[in-house]
Image (cartoon, rainbow, N blue to C red):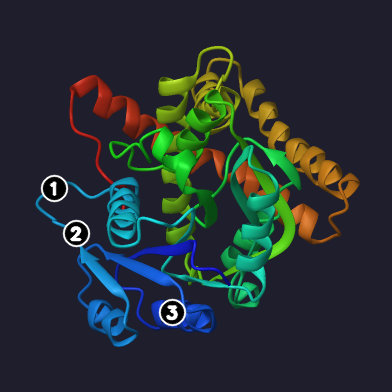
Amino acid sequence: MEQNLGIVIIGRNEGERLKNCLISLQPYNLSIIYVDSGSTDGSVELACSFSTNVVELDLSVPFTVARAKNIGFETLLSLYPHLEYVQFLDGDSQIVPDWLDQAKLYLEKHPEIAVVCGRRREKYPEQSIYNFICDLEGDTPIGETNACGGDAMISVKALQEIGGYNPELIVGEEAEMCIRLRQKGWKIWRLAAEMTLHDAQMTHFSQWWKRHERVGYAYANGATLHGRAPEFHWVKEDKSSWFWGLVLPVIIILGAPLTEGITLLFLSAYPFWVYKIARSQQKMGRQEPAATIYAFFCVLSKFPQAQGQLQFYLQRLTGKKHQLIS
């Protein structure tokens, strides 16, 4: 493989997952930057043992994933200015064999495309229902798309043109970056190929809840930044979370004593919506019981998402600096 591709990995206390990530990259002999955000588990020493260039973030500056990615990207290019493409990786993911070759070749053949991504699979979907849901959520449509996730290969020229990720965003930085790329005429593409194995280690309901709080926060932030035409970025998702996760429950609870319990009938809307989503998933080719499980958690996720949205708007109203949901 030609040395016009570099790797940026970000992580904190990933332990064995970071080791697996680095091992998966060894066959390629590529330039790698690992950006660490205050690990206490020996991650920095581990990365150094793989002869990886390590950047330790200044923790006196508020941490964001976007800032970590920007610093990794800038450091990579300062050391290897000839690079044309960069693969971003989360430290809890590992590269699937052949992905780097496929993705780079596709970008070389299609200079109008800024970002390519593929299928991100969960490494252990059988370990918990939450890992299983993460695996289902990674199965997004093939072809041109509006956004990528944390793992993606990006054209250096394209990312430099828009000035990198928005370092102020605490979540949703990839989707926002893709909006600015598309506004410049670039395209985002998902290939029909396995890209990474992700080790979520999500075994508790509280972890799943926090994850969707962050999603709701991202919806609110994204709609605030790019919610106007022509993007209408996450406006539909923002309204959906508000309605199903907050407005309808308030109507049901507060209206019950005033309507002699009639508003409790509105609770039937939730199982009906699960049914509708499950049927839609089956038409798209997803088999039972996966379609129903996916649908159930889609509906349930509206409650933590509404909580995340409330956090965003309360912080905005009070003028508090946005903080990570952890």
Q: Position of residue 289 (x, y in %)?
A: 81, 61
Q: Is residue 319 left or right of residue 266?
A: left
Label at residue 57: 2
Q: Give the residue drawn at x 54%, y 21%.
A: 251
Q: Is residue 234 left or right of residue 63?
A: right
Which class describes the residues within 10 Å of circle 1: few (<14), some (14-19), or many (20+)? few
Judging by the rendered image, the residue that carries numbered circle 3 is 22
Q: Nearer the viewer, residue 317 or 98?
A: 98
Q: Position of residue 260 (x, y in %)?
A: 61, 20
Q: Give the residue drawn at x 71%, y 39%.
A: 144
Does 16 appear above or below 299? below
Labels 1 and 2 touching (C-beta < 8 A)? yes
Does 135 appear above or below 199? above
Which class describes the residues within 10 Å of circle 2: few (<14), some (14-19), or many (20+)? some
**Amino acid on which the number 2 mark rests in the picture:** Leu
Does 313 appear above or below 212? above
| Mark toward the viewer: 1 or 3 | 3
Does 148 appear above or below 28? above
Q: Is residue 94 left or right of residue 220?
A: right
Tag count in the figure?
3
Q: Of the two numbered discs 1 and 3 on the same chain, state the one appearing first in sequence.
A: 3
Which class describes the residues within 10 Å of circle 3: few (<14), some (14-19), or many (20+)? many
Q: Give the residue drawn at x 23%, y 83%.
A: 45
**Amino acid on which the number 1 mark rests in the picture:** Val
Q: Nearer the viewer, residue 205 or 118?
A: 118
Q: Give the residue drawn at x 33%, y 59%.
A: 76
Label at residue 61: 1
Q: Helix or strand or loop: what does disc 3 sit on? A: helix
Q: Nearer the viewer, residue 259 or 272?
A: 272
Q: Helix or strand or loop: what does disc 2 sit on? A: loop
